[in-house]
Image: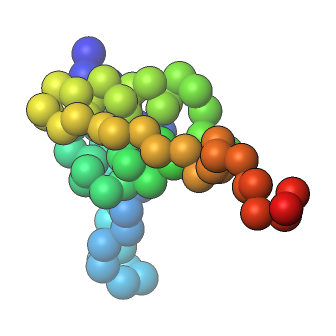
């Protein structure tokens, strides 16, 4: 089975009497690269889905370089 990114959802087309619902499948292969990277950077993202995103980006040949927001350098200017 293909990997899902989100649960299936319904899209509604038409108005009132002609309204039909269309099932939309959210497979990870069809998800945009920006959306996958945004999910990886989201602190509230589930680790299992983050791993799926990382696997998909690796499958597409995209290498990710992790950069920490926190600086590990010591601030010595305030000591002098």
Position of residue 35 relative to residue 60, above or below, is below
Left or right: residue 44 compared with residue 23: right
Q: Residue at x 17, y 26 (%)?
A: 59
Q: Residue at x 26, y 15 (%)?
A: 1
Quadrant of the image occupied by residue 8: top left
- Image location (x, y in percent) of residue 46: 61, 33
Q: Residue furthest top?
A: 1
- Image location (x, y in percent) of residue 69: 59, 52
Quadrant of the image occupied by residue 56: top left
Q: Residue at x 48, y 32 (%)?
A: 50
Query: Could one spot residue 20 in this view of the protein?
Result: yes
Q: Residue at x 85, y 62 (%)?
A: 80
- Image location (x, y in percent) of residue 47: 58, 27
- The image shows a total of numbered marks equal to 0
Q: Residue furthest right?
A: 79
Q: How is the protein colored in the picture?
A: rainbow
Q: Residue furthest front?
A: 80
- Image location (x, y in percent) of residue 54: 35, 30
Query: Could one spot residue 23 in this view of the protein?
Result: no
Q: Residue furthest bottom?
A: 15
- Residue closest to the eye, 16 or 68: 68
- Residue closest to the eye, 65 or 5: 65
């Amino acid at each position: 089975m293909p990997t899902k990114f989100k649960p299936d959802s319904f899209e509604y087309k038409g108005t009132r009497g002609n309204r039909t619902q269309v099932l939309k499948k959210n497979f990870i292969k069809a998800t945009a690269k920006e959306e996958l990277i945004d999910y990886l950077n989201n602190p509230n993202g589930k680790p299992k889905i983050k791993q799926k995103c990382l696997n998909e980006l690796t499958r597409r040949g995209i290498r990710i370089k992790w950069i920490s927001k926190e600086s590990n350098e010591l601030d010595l200017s305030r000591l002098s």
